[in-house]
């Protein structure tokens, strides 16, 4: 019932023709002469036997004062990876002891580290889907909630902490997940973006038990091919709104859901977006790129160009992609935001399709003027990365960067 043609999208090889059509000639990376200041020290700092990774989240899971890394794996492995930091930026994968298993056919396409039960340690939300063995079809898989014991060891409490849907009903093709307090009761809720079927909203009762509250979502997104999501207050009324990136089969447009104040959402896409933009978004993020105090939008699109939408201050967006993003911002499968050069404005790292023969390398988009005009510079080393995350790996106060891939992983140390 839930099989779905994937078009082999993540492996990307068959989309090469599309990439050629979209990006034209090979990119002019590095011709601006800007050095990122990053040195890839993966060989020194992370194990060389890591599994293929798709998505990343960072946080201090064991509460020892340094930042650890959670890596969602592709199909095959029996669990995701958890890289524990030794305090000096060297990592061991301790997942076998610390992380509950998942089905071997399942792949992790979304992950959040967030305190779900209010005991001040980071728990884990995992959004999953599943490859049907021997096919390129994607099927549903139940998402997981892992609760931290306080020392960074996790228990799978998915079945006791999600109420209102049966296991079969929770068998969704989930591609994005985001946590935040949508109804103002100070407890962290979460939203799951699903592919080709209804997305889900789960409201926290204050003790880390979540009730299916998807009836608060608008019917317009019931069968959307949602592939990424984020939360942020776009209209400045104090509640969290939701963006849904849409993709995989090149249909539909991004959807913007405006919070009516109680976690009940209204689809105001056509009202608030100046044009139909941002298809094929495998990552989507709210960020104030121009420093005017409102949240703008970045869409990481595959295999097309990324998109940048600017907020007018009241939650109405215009497409500034052509004016503000370089052509290297394309064929992107994951992104993260951080001020890596400490000049006070947000910069962007892009993970790019590792199998694409033209745009193999990850890039940094440097915010050149604080107003969101970005210039691209390549990150060192061959091979792209499915997802990237900024964090201070070695504890020296600046932002390092990790990139995960189908095979080769990168840990770029900031040497500026
Ligand atoms: Ca730690
Ligand atoms: Ca917790
Ligand atoms: Ca709002
Ligand atoms: Ca802004």
Image (cartoon, rainbow, N blue to C red):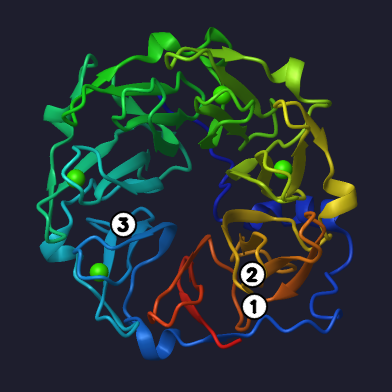
The quadrant in which residue 186 appears is: top left
Task: Name the one closer to the observer, 185 or 218.
Answer: 185
Taking the image as four quarters, which one is ligand 4 found in? top right
Residue 378 in sight: yes
Residue 142 vertical position relative to residue 391 in the rendered view, above or below: above
Query: Distance from label 3 to label 1 (Cα)?
Result: 29 Å
Q: Residues within 10 Å of mark 1 (few under 14, many from 20)?
A: many
Q: Which quadrant holds the C terminus?
A: bottom right
Tell me, for residue 379, which label it has, or none.
1
Q: Pinpoint residue 284: horizontal percent, then vertical percent.
A: 59, 43
Q: Residues within 10 Å of mark 3 (few under 14, many from 20)?
A: some
Residue 228 vertical position relative to residue 305 in the rendered view, above or below: above
**Residue behind mark 3:** 76
| Residue sitting at x 42%, y 38% | 177
Answer yes or no: do the residues labelled 3 and 1 have beta carbons within 8 Å? no
The quadrant in which residue 312 appears is: top right
Horizontal side of residue 365 vs 179, given as left or right: right
Q: Pinpoint residue 30: horizontal percent, then vertical percent.
A: 80, 80
Look at discs 3 and 1 and give the one toward the viewer: 1
Horizontal side of residue 78 vs 259, given as left or right: left
The quadrant in which residue 251 appears is: top right
Badge 3 marks a residue whose secondary structure is loop
Horizontal side of residue 169 vs 200, given as left or right: left
Residue 1 in sight: no
Q: Pinpoint residue 233: horizontal percent, then vertical percent.
A: 56, 31
Task: Name the one closer to the observer, 272 or 330.
Answer: 272
Tell me, for residue 248, which label it has, or none.
none
**Residue behind mark 2:** 362
Residue 51 vertical position relative to residue 283 in the rendered view, above or below: below
Answer yes or no: do the residues labelled 2 and 1 have beta carbons within 8 Å? yes
């Amino acid at each position: 019932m839930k099989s779905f043609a994937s078009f082999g999208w993540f492996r990307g090889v068959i989309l090469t023709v599309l990439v050629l059509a979209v990006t034209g000639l090979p990119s002019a990376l590095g011709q601006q002469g800007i050095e990122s200041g990053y040195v890839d020290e993966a060989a020194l700092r992370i194990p060389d036997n890591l599994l293929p990774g798709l998505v990343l989240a960072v946080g201090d899971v064991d509460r020892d004062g340094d930042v650890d890394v959670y890596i969602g794996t592709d199909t095959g492995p029996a669990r995701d990876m958890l890289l524990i930091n030794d305090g000096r930026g060297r990592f061991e994968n301790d997942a076998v002891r610390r992380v509950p298993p998942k089905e071997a056919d399942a792949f992790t396409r979304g992950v959040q580290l967030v305190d779900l039960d209010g005991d001040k340690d980071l728990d884990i939300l995992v959004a999953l889907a599943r490859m049907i063995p021997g096919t390129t079809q994607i099927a549903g898989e139940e998402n997981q909630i892992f609760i931290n014991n306080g020392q960074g060891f996790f228990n799978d409490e998915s079945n006791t902490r999600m109420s209102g849907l049966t296991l079969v009903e929770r068998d969704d093709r989930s591609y994005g997940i985001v946590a935040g307090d949508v109804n103002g009761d100070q407890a962290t809720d979460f939203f799951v973006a699903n592919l080709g079927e209804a997305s889900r909203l789960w409201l926290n009762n204050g003790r880390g038990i979540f009730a299916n509250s998807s009836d608060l979502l608008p019917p317009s997104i019931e069968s959307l091919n949602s592939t990424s999501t984020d939360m942020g207050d776009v209209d400045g009324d104090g509640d969290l709104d939701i963006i849904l990136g849409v993709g995989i089969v090149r249909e539909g447009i991004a959807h913007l859901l405006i919070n009516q104040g109680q976690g009940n959402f209204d689809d105001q896409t056509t009202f608030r977006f100046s044009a139909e933009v941002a298809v094929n978004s495998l990552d989507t993020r709210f960020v104030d790129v121009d420093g005017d105090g409102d949240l703008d939008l970045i869409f990481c699109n595959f295999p097309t160009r990324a998109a940048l939408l600017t907020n007018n201050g009241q939650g109405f967006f215009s497409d500034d992609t052509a004016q503000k993003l370089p052509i290297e911002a394309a064929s992107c499968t994951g992104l993260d935001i951080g001020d890596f050069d400490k000049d006070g404005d947000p910069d962007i790292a892009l993970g790019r399709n590792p199998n694409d023969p033209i745009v193999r390398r990850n890039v940094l988009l440097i915010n050149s003027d604080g107003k969101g005009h970005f210039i691209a510079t390549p990150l060192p080393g061959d091979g792209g990365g499915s997802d990237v995350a900024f964090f201070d790996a070695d504890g020296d106060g600046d932002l390092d960067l990790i990139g995960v891939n189908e095979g080769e992983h990168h840990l770029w140390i900031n040497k500026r």
